[in-house]
Amino acid sequence: MVARQAGIGIFGGTFDPIHYGHLRAAEEFGETLGLSEVRLIPTGAPPHRGGPVASPAHRLAMAQLAVEGNPRLKVDDREIRRDTLCYTIDTLHELRAELGETPLAWLIGADSFYRLSSWRRWRELFDLAMLAVACRPGFDLDAWRDHADPELLAEVLPRIQPLTIPATVERGTIALLPTTPLALSATAIRQRLADHRSARYLAPAAVLDYAERHLLYRP
Ligand code: ATP
């Protein structure tokens, strides 16, 4: 058991719908870094992709159902409440202002990490938080290095720190988290539900029941 420090973790995503890949990564992030709280932040209008399929209110409701009973995982609805385009940098500035000097760690999956240099004011992110990268099947760091954006590589490689247990949450550093690889995606779940195939055990039952009750991913 890893001792907890007062650090706060955040994990943003479309969560359309939230699934066990997200939840397991968030859980291991909280445990490995000894965070007192991990906030899942469903995005309102994500700048990086086509619009989500389910409405912000439905994605928020599913995230809330998913964390029920887990005292460390919370849902933060700030991006859903915003009616303008959501950039992570704005959310991080807002959180930093609220939390003062509390250590802040920001979790992203490997696929998002590889695209980091396309994010708005991405270098500024390192002034505000530590970055933790969850492994995701199909995204291999060594293979990525060979064809990654050189500007991104130059910025991130020197920041990668070996993970210590207990870990130190220090802004500007990057930790590669050895999370349990789960080859799950929201796209595959939406596709299954649209095809009337089973999505059971890919996401919490309460999430799938909600999606079905509201016919969220039916054609
Ligand atoms: P979609 O299939 O709709 O693109 P997704 O399953 O990739 O969705 P997102 O909500 O887009 O989920 O992802 C939110 C964050 O969770 C991203 O940082 C992404 O890299 C990470 N993530 C998603 N699925 C996994 C997984 N199976 N393991 C680890 N990280 C994941």
Image (cartoon, rainbow, N blue to C red):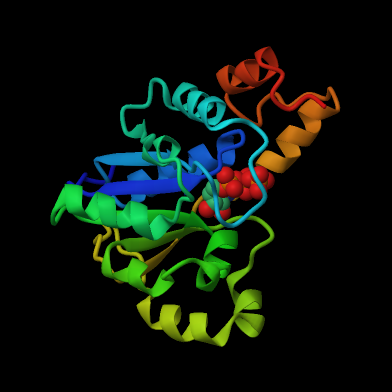
Q: From this view, report whether residue 190 is shown above or below residue 167.
A: above
Residue 76 is situated, as x and y percent measured from the top left of the image, at 36, 36
Q: Nearer the viewer, residue 184 or 195?
A: 195
Residue at horizontal 36%, vertical 71%? 162
Residue at horizontal 26%, vertical 50%? 95
Q: Is residue 1 visible?
A: yes
Residue 127 is situated, as x and y percent measured from the top left of the image, at 27, 70
Residue at horizontal 35%, vertical 56%? 90
Q: From this view, report whether residue 39 is shown above or below residue 144.
A: above
Instruction: Kindly give the residue lying farthest to the right in the view shown.
Output: 195
Instruction: Kindly give the residue lying farthest to the front in the view shown.
Output: 84
> Within the image, what quadrant is residue 174 found in?
bottom left
Instruction: Kindly give the residue lying farthest to the top in the view shown.
Output: 213
Residue at horizontal 44%, vertical 43%? 26
Q: From this view, report whether residue 125 is shown above or below residue 7.
A: below
Residue 58 lies left or right of residue 10; in this view the side is: right
Q: Quadrant of the C terminus?
A: top right
Q: Quadrant of the N terminus?
A: top left
Residue 160 is situated, as x and y percent measured from the top left of the image, at 39, 74
Q: Is residue 184 visible?
A: no
Residue 186 is situated, as x and y percent measured from the top left of the image, at 66, 40
